[in-house]
């Protein structure tokens, strides 16, 4: 097992991606939304994994910043899907809570590398 697989933030990012994938597969979304949302959600876990393998603090920090940026990208998609009535309020709030938790954890990780 790789060290990053034991990280709580990685586990949460992976679960968030799987939730986003279910959302994508269970709704009729435009192709570009499917592509962008899927890639952004997947990018969170991938950047956490890749960053954890870097030796310098600066390199790790950059990957965690990118992961956090992907969280924000997902939030923008979720916000738009809510406005388009694809998500109800309860679903919207659930996704936002999970994204907020990821963002906060990554923020702390980034600050600890400064």
Image (tube, rainbow, N blue to C red):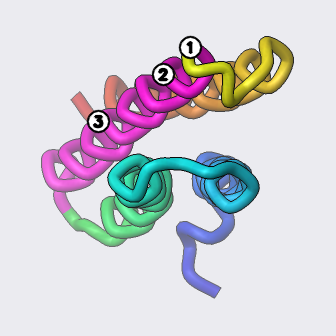
Which residue in the protein does label 2 denote? 80
Residue 35 lies, with reference to residue 36, above or below; the image says below
Q: Is residue 50 left or right of residue 8?
A: left
- Between 84 and 68, the one lying in front of the other is 84
Q: State which region is magenta.
A: 56-83
**In the rendered image, which quarter is residue 73 located in?**
top left
Task: Using the image, tell me which numbered label, if any, was put on residue 73.
Answer: none
Residue displayed at 52% across by 19% down: 79
Is 42 included in the stretch rendered in magenta? no
Q: Quadrant of the C terminus?
A: top left
Residue displayed at 34% across by 71% down: 53
Residue displayed at 56% across by 13% down: 83
Which residue in the protein does label 1 denote? 83
Question: How would you rate the neighbour count of disc 3 (Cα within 10 Å): few for under 14, some for 14-19, many for 20 or more?
Answer: some
Task: Using the image, tell me which numbered label, if any, was put on residue 113.
Answer: 3
- Between 59 and 14, the one lying in front of the other is 14
């Amino acid at each position: 097992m790789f060290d990053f697989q034991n990280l709580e933030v990685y586990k949460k990012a992976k679960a968030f991606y799987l939730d986003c994938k279910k959302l994508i597969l269970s709704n009729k979304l435009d192709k570009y939304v499917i592509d962008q949302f899927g890639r952004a959600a997947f990018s969170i876990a991938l950047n956490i994994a890749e960053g954890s393998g870097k030796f310098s603090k600066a390199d790790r920090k950059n990957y965690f910043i990118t992961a956090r940026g992907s969280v924000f990208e997902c939030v923008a998609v979720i916000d738009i899907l809510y406005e388009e009535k694809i998500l109800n309020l309860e679903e919207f709030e659930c996704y936002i809570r999970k994204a907020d938790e990821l963002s906060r954890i990554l923020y702390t990780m980034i600050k600890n590398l400064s």
